[in-house]
């Protein structure tokens, strides 16, 4: 993902619209791929590809909104910018609820569009980075023994070694040993680092507090 | 024999003929005389005989009376002698005389006879006037006579020398009758005692019963030649009599009976002799006859007087009667002449009685004939009237029942048989109220009967009442009962008319309800007569009356009066509308010419008018909205279609600006021009957007509605077109409501589009294959669904793809916007329109909309 040039995917049934958008976006040095229908786009896209999607709502066959629903179903997180010829409010609300990042009415100001594309690409990059980190943490978590996993949960929950030892029925020394092994396996430099990883891995740390 | 009867008849007729000619007066006198004579003759024959027998009886009684009296006198005389004898025997002079004397039984000597008063008798004056002695004897105890005082100077009869002991009494004085030497004597003896009380013998008085004694015994009482005598019954001859010259002693009874009536009586006291001596009373016959003749004479005179009186009174009475009869006859004759026109009876000479009899006979004949005729006439009339009555009774429409005072049925006509289901013969004698009248009404019926008897003030003497009657099959029905008493000669009966008033009551109820009908009507109903006066106005017509400013009984305003007159003249209905305040009334004026009034039927049509206006407004709105939405949709379509090229222009221009190298000569001019291009494109887009906002987009209006109602309403809009196409829109709707929250006008337009399309598609197929169904219901997912299914021409394949594309149409005159707009509207409401591609014949469009409850749940 990194180092790869992100793509701007344009899905519009109108030929003139497609090529004009390609002409505009390429003018700022971004790569553009165009598709006439949503189906065509789905066939050529896989989740690994970075970029953002410019989607016309009104299309024959699968409409823009339907495509959004498809992405939600398949947990595809590509940022989507909706372009519409007639921006009526209910449609906009529906689009945004389905996870669109922006909603732009035709005919649009080129600056506005390009700004929106840049934001969308940045978001995509961010998302991809977070996803990669989460995958790494998940791999490290998988290396922990069940006892270590237990200790990590309790440590990130803010419990002292003694408390943990009492709870688990082991000595404080053993807890200390588990703890250091966890820090090592998780490649955490500090307790704060470990807590951040636990948050990223979606380990619930607020259980005890509440 | 026959000859004799004939003869008698002839005699009779002859006699009658003569009798008729004798005047009544004369006849009466004659008859009176004849009767008198007859009575006389009869009495003369009968009376003397009867008289004589009575007389004889009387005589006998008198004779017996006389005989008894004479005998009593005789006995009294004897009793005087007896008492005198006792006196003499007990007298002092006798006892003093006897003191020194002693009569030896053996001494036989003749008795001493004295011719002057002896010493043993007191002075003669003391007893001589009382008695009539013949001799007085002193007898010793052996019955030998010792001393004799001879008063009559006759020789002592030998029987008295030694007196039989029978004649001598021992203790008390005793009298005996006997005959001595053929002559009757009375012997009375008494014990004689001396001064010492020694019984010396007896003193005996010997009295000859001669004429002198007998005469003396009667003491001169005997009169009119009545004699007494002593009579020997054995010998049938007299021993002595009071008058020896007329009846000498020894004369026989036959001789004496010639001149005297002899009554003989036996003695009871003086039985002492063998002689059967009787006392006889002799009454001379001559004296008797004289008396008898005198009595007869008096009697005959009386008879004569009686007969004369009888005749005269009889004659007088008859005379007066005949006079009276004459007068009556004259009057009758007058009456006859006047009343009957007959000269009967003619007053001629003759016997009025016969005339009268004749006339009466004739008169009675006439009367009888007349009476017979009348009777026959009356009978015929009676029969006819009876037959008519019977026919009336039988033909009567109402049951007629006759009962007696106790309520028993005595007549039951055939209508009653039919009505009540009983046979006449079965109910005769049964109590009417318990048979016919319902049990609860029995007291009422009895009250009516009682009132009929007691209340004399009843009109026509009859009484009516309503109650329930029972049939034989126990069904009940209301009846009016009229009871009328009929007074027959011997008893009182009641005729009962029973009328079934079921239908009448129903009719009454109907009339009552009909009468209420106009009053109850919510619409104004009025009745106005020819001059325009309101005769009747129901309560609902109050607003109208207020508008006209008149009331019931007042005249209508002039305009309406003229309308009423016009209606009368034309004879036909006239209808008009009048606006009263906020209400609109439709008035129908219907003339009833023959009754001279008009009926005005009003109807409040405010609501109808309002509904009509609303419907029209609604339709106009629909048209307007339809037009607007068409324009809006067109604008949307145009905007979309124009936006694409405009956007493309702007994009290209922008792309060009960015690609222009800054160092390129004249770049700024190009940049300006390219900026202008994209700016103008944006401006064009803005114009289009503004236009669309102006025409198309209003704020969405949502209201709750029933989809079924919308379908029905739309179906009424297309009814005309559907009929023109020859199609009946079949509505297969759910029973309940199908609630949706929609813009009613828009959704109606969608439905209208779908149905119109279907109708147009149907026009292309033969009429008998045309069918259109609108169906409503719920989707499985809970949405409301409307199907429009037709058997029209269907949708071609290439058309199917572009169905919802703007400006695509298969119709020559179409704009290609209908389905597009419809789809937009459906989507605006969160629903959609789909085509069922599987159908082989015609087309099947389906509109789905979220159900109202679902929407509410989500929010």
Image: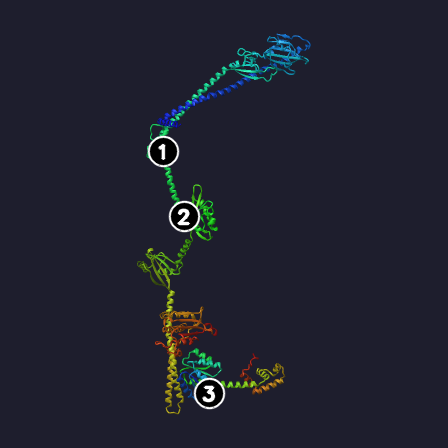
Q: Residues within 10 Å of mark 3 (few under 14, many from 20)?
A: some
Write down the residue under mark 1: B362
Query: Which residue is at the front of the view, B31 or A11?
Result: B31
Write down the residue under mark 3: A6
Write down the residue under mark 2: B394
Q: Residues within 10 Å of mark 1 (few under 14, many from 20)?
A: some
Q: Residue at x 33, y 35 (%)?
A: B340
Mark 1 or mark 2, which is nearer the start of the sequence? 1
SS at badge 3: loop
Parent chain of label 2: B
Q: Which mark is residue B806?
A: none
Residue B827 lies in what quarter of the image? Answer: bottom left
Placement of the N terminus of chain B among the 4 image quadrants: top left
In front: label 3 or label 2: 2
In the image, taking residue B724 as reference, residue B302 lies left or right, namely: right
In front: label 1 or label 3: 1
SS at badge 1: helix
């Amino acid at each position: 993902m990194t180092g790869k040039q992100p793509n701007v995917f344009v899905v519009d049934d109108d030929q003139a619209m497609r090529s004009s958008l390609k002409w505009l976006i390429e003018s700022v040095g971004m790569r553009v791929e165009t598709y006439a229908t949503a189906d065509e786009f789905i066939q050529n896209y896989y989740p690994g590809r970075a970029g953002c999607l410019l989607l016309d709502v009104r299309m024959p066959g699968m409409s823009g909104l339907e495509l959004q629903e498809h992405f939600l179903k398949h947990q595809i997180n590509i940022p989507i910018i909706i372009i519409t010829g007639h921006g009526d409010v209910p449609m906009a609300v529906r689009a945004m609820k389905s996870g669109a990042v922006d909603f732009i009415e035709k005919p649009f100001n080129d600056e506005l569009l390009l700004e929106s594309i840049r934001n969308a690409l940045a978001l995509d990059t961010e998302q991809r980075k977070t996803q990669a980190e989460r995958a790494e943490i998940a791999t490290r978590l998988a290396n922990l023994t069940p006892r270590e996993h237990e200790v990590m949960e309790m440590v990130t929950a803010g419990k002292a070694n003694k408390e943990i030892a009492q709870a688990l029925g082991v000595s404080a020394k053993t807890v200390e040993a588990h703890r250091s092994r966890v820090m090592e396996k998780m490649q955490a430099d500090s307790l704060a680092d470990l807590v951040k990883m636990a948050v990223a891995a979606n380990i619930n740390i607020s259980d005890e507090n509440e | 024999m026959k000859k004799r009867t004939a003869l008698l008849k002839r005699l009779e007729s002859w006699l009658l003929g003569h009798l008729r000619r004798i005047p009544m007066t004369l006849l009466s006198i004659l008859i009176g005389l004849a009767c008198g004579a007859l009575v006389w003759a009869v009495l003369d024959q009968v009376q003397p005989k009867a008289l004589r027998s009575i007389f004889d009886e009387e005589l006998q009684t008198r004779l017996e009376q006389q005989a008894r009296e004479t005998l009593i006198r005789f006995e009294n005389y004897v009793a005087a002698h007896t008492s005198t004898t006792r006196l003499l025997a007990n007298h002092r002079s006798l006892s003093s005389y006897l003191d020194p004397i002693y009569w030896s039984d053996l001494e036989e000597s003749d008795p001493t006879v004295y011719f002057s008063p002896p010493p043993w008798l007191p002075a003669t004056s003391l007893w001589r006037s009382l008695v009539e002695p013949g001799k007085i004897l002193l007898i010793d105890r052996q019955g030998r006579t010792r001393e004799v005082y001879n008063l009559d100077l006759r020789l002592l009869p030998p029987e008295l020398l030694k007196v039989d002991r029978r004649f001598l009494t021992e203790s008390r004085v005793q009298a005996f009758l006997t005959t001595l030497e053929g002559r009757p004597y009375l012997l009375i003896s008494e014990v004689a005692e001396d001064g010492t009380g020694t019984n010396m013998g007896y003193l005996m008085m010997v009295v000859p019963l001669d004429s002198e004694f007998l005469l003396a015994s009667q003491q001169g009482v005997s009169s009119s030649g009545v004699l007494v005598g002593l009579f020997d019954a054995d010998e049938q001859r007299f021993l002595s009599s009071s008058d020896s010259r007329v009846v000498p002693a020894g004369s026989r009874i036959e001789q004496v009976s010639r001149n005297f009536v002899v009554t003989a009586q036996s003695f009871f006291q003086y039985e002492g002799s063998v002689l059967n001596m009787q006392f006889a009373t002799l009454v001379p016959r001559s004296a008797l006859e004289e008396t008898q003749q005198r009595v007869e004479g008096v009697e005959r005179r009386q008879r004569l007087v009686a007969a004369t009186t009888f005749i005269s009174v009889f004659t007088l009475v008859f005379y007066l009667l005949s006079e009276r009869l004459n007068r009556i006859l004259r009057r009758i004759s007058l009456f006859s002449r006047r009343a009957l026109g007959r000269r009967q009876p003619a007053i001629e000479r003759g016997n009025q009685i016969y005339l009268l009899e004749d006339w009466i006979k004739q008169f009675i004949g006439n009367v009888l004939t007349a009476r017979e005729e009348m009777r026959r006439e009356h009978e015929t009339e009676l029969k006819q009237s009876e037959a008519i009555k019977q026919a009336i009774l039988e033909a009567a429409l109402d049951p007629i029942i006759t009962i007696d005072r106790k309520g028993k049925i005595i007549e039951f006509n055939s209508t009653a048989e039919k009505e009540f289901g009983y046979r006449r013969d079965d109910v005769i004698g049964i109590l009417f109220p318990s048979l016919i009248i319902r049990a609860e009404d029995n007291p009422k019926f009895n009250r009516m009967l009682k009132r009929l008897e007691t209340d004399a003030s009843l009109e026509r003497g009859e009484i009516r009442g309503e109650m329930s009657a029972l049939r034989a099959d126990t069904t009940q029905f209301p009846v009016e009962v009229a009871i009328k008493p009929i007074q027959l000669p011997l008893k009182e009966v009641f005729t009962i008319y029973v009328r079934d008033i079921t239908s009448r009551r129903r009719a009454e109820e109907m009339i009552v309800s009909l009468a209420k009908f106009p009053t109850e009507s919510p619409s104004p109903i009025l009745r106005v007569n020819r001059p325009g006066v309101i005769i009747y106005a129901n309560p609902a017509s109050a607003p109208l009356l207020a508008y006209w400013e008149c009331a019931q009984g007042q005249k209508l305003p002039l305009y309406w009066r003229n309308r009423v007159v016009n209606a009368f003249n034309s004879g036909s209905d006239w209808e008009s509308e009048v606006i009263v305040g906020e209400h609109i009334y439709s008035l129908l004026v219907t003339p009833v010419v023959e009754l001279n009034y008009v009926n005005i039927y009003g109807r409040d049509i405010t609501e109808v008018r309002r509904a009509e206006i609303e419907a029209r407004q609604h339709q106009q709105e629909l048209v307007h909205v339809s037009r607007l939405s068409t324009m809006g949709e067109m604008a949307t379509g145009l905007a979309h279609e124009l936006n694409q090229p405009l956007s493309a222009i702007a994009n290209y221009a922008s792309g060009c600006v960015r690609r222009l190298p800054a160092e390129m000569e004249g770049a700024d001019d190009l940049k300006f021009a390219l900026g202008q291009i994209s700016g103008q494109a944006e401006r064009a887009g803005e114009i289009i957007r503004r236009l669309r906002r102006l025409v198309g987009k209003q704020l969405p209006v949502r209201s709750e509605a029933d989809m079924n109602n919308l379908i029905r309403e739309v179906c009424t809009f297309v009814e005309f077109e559907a009929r023109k196409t020859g199609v009946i829109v079949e509505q297969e709707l759910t029973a309940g409501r199908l609630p949706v929250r929609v813009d009613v006008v828009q959704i109606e337009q969608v439905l209208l589009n779908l149905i119109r399309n279907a109708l147009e598609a149907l026009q292309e197929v033969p009429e008998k294959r045309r069918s259109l169904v609108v169906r409503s219901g719920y989707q499985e997912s809970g949405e409301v669904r409307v199907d429009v299914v037709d058997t029209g021409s269907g949708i071609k394949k290439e058309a199917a793809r572009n169905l919802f594309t703007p400006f695509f149409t298969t119709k020559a005159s179409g704009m290609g916007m209908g389905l597009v707009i419809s789809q937009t509207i459906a989507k605006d409401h969160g629903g959609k329109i789909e085509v069922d591609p599987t159908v082989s014949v015609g087309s099947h469009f389906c509109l789905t909309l979220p159900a109202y409850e679902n929407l509410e749940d989500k929010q």
